[in-house]
Image (tube, grey):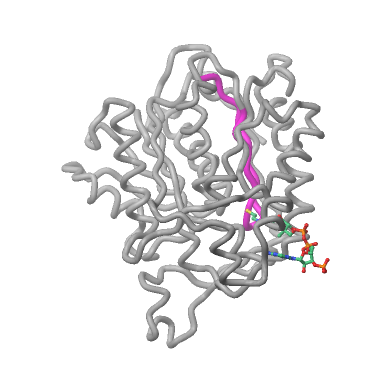
Amino acid sequence: MCAVDKTAIGFLGLGAYVPERVLTNYDLEQMVDTSNDWIVTRTGIRERRICAPGEGAVAIATESARRALEDAKLAVDDIDLIICCTFTSETLCPSAACQVQRNLGATRPIPAFDLAAACSGFIYGCSVAASFIRSGVYRRVLVIGVDAISKFIDWSDRNTCVLFADGGGAAVLGQVEEGHGLLGQSLGADGSGADAIRLLSSGVADPFSATAMNGHRSTITMNGHDVFKFATRILGTAVEEALADAGQGLKAADLDLIIPHQANVRIIESAAKKLKLPMDRFVINIDKFGNTSAGTVPLAMNDARQDGRLKPGTLFAVVAFGGGLTYAASIWRW
Ligand code: COA
């Protein structure tokens, strides 16, 4: 935990993008030994989006970023830094961020890098962006949260293939009116749980090709029970730590909205119980999109904004957990 300077740093624009192809639970019933009932009851997921052949994290990141810039009424050359939070880019080098910079047509050498904190990535990225802005190094930072996990799924493993999906979102961060923006945060990692979610290698542009990785492609493995235990403990705790960091006597009950990582609706229900908040205070879109890792938080923020739930003055928390095991929460006033 670290105290946040009170310089007002907030969101100037927001955008999101998901691939067009829908994969329903009924489709999965044809692929593995599972059922729509089991997936809905145990996770809350009904359908998810999957990349088309040739589409990947970079394309999702580029379109999300383009929409966030449009929302902020800014051009790419107005941006001073691009951070792309992902662990499923098609290439390890170049970074997804550099490819987004090119795709957006930047004419300045805007610094760009990827940040890997799995599902906590977007909140970590916003924290890094806020630090650069607060210290006066940069004025406006584009933060993208995206994953294309379908590329790294073993489609015969029902433990993972029903959960993960593709999608993302982006935000432009900069100085906002006093009293708005970032109020407090809590970032953390528990490396003792490093083996709970693993992807041994990344950066395969075409993981389905027969020659990729000498015929062996890397896929995600997960110990669902260990992750579930960590998540139910950390989600509420991280929000409480971020509230304490914000100070001003802020309590969970003061939050208008909580925008959590969408991994399992039962994990969100347990956080609601711990924070003693009703479920209607939480933004939930896992039914439509599944777990898009670093993409879930900006996707859910974008949905909440479009539904009119996230509006000027809204006091809200974002919170996530994921591989690492990482976690992150922050408190904002829109
Ligand atoms: N479809 C149908 N049945 C399934 C199944 C599937 N996809 N996966 C497991 N099952 C079966 C199991 O074999 C077991 O059967 P049994 O009772 O006959 O032995 C039963 O369902 C219960 O399995 P269990 O693993 O105990 O289910 P669960 O309620 O713990 O749910 C997860 C499994 C993966 C959904 C849950 O552990 C979870 O969400 N973990 C966190 C994962 C996560 O958040 N990952 C992302 C982190 S960013």
Side (left or right) of 103 relative to 205: left
Q: Which residue is drawn at 34% across and 66% down?
A: 53
Q: Does the magenta stretch include residue 185?
A: no
Q: In which quarter of the image is residue 157?
A: bottom right
The image position of residue 122, as x and y in percent, is 51, 43
How many marks are shown on the rendered structure? Answer: 0
Residue 326 in percent (x, y) is at: 64, 51
- Percent across and percent down for residue 309 are 54, 22
Q: Position of residue 167 (x, y in %)?
A: 45, 50
Bounds of the magenta span? 317-334
Question: Which of 112 and 230 lies nearest the eye of the viewer?
Answer: 230
**Residue that appears at 44% across and 46% down:** 168
Q: Would residue 75 be found to the left or right of residue 126 on screen?
A: left
Name the image quarter holding the N terminus: top right
The image shows residue 288, relative to residue 149, as above or below, that is: above
Taking the spot 48% from the left edge, 78% from the top edge, the residue there is: 217
- As rendered, which of 325 and 191 lies closer to the eye? 325
Q: Which of the pair 33/59 is nearer the observer?
A: 33
Residue under the point 42% across and 74% down: 207
